[in-house]
Amino acid sequence: MISHFQYKSVGSKVRKPKWEISFFYRGAYYRALYLHTGEFEWFDPSPPEDEKKKIQSQLHELMLFHIYEKQDS
């Protein structure tokens, strides 16, 4: 389960926005860049390969809520 999820905008906010995200998963701390395309660029360490898709799916849902849903409000 993802906990202590945080995000902040980095880089150009207009043309190609991206966000730095951080969170804990199973007691380990992870960081990544979340790109406007929905892709992730992981900092070291990255999550285990066998769990990466599941984690990325959960993070994508969080970002959709926090970034895109808030803009509509």
Image: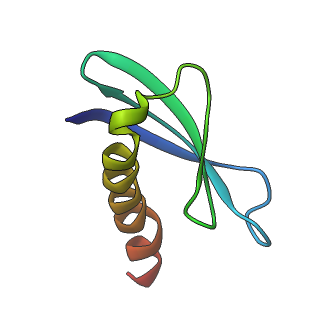
Question: Residue 31 vs residue 64: left or right?
Answer: right
Left or right of residue 70: residue 1: left
Query: In this view of the protein, which residue sits in the foreground, 14 or 57?
Result: 57
Residue at 38%, 51% in the rendered image: 59
Outermost residue toward the front in this view: 50
Residue at the spot x=35%, y=56% of the render?
57
27 versus 43 height, above or below: above
Farthest residue, direction bottom: 72
* Quarter of the rendering occupied by the C terminus: bottom left
Residue ID at (33%, 37%): 51
- Image height of 6 relative to 12, above or below: above
Query: Where 3 falls versus 29 (above or below)?
Result: below
Q: Position of residue 19 (x, y in %)?
A: 60, 50
Residue 6 position within the rendered picture, expressed as x and y whole percent measured from the top left? 42, 39
Q: From the viewer's side, name the closer residue of 1 and 3.
A: 1
Residue 12 spot, x, y in % from top left:
80, 59
Q: How many marks?
A: 0
Q: Is residue 43 left or right of residue 57?
A: right
Residue 23 placement (x, y as % from top left):
38, 31
Q: Is residue 8 left or right of residue 4?
A: right
Colouring style: rainbow
| Quadrant in which the N terminus appears | top left
Outermost residue toward the top in this view: 27
Quadrant of res 70:
bottom left
Tell me the residue at 43%/29% (across/down): 47
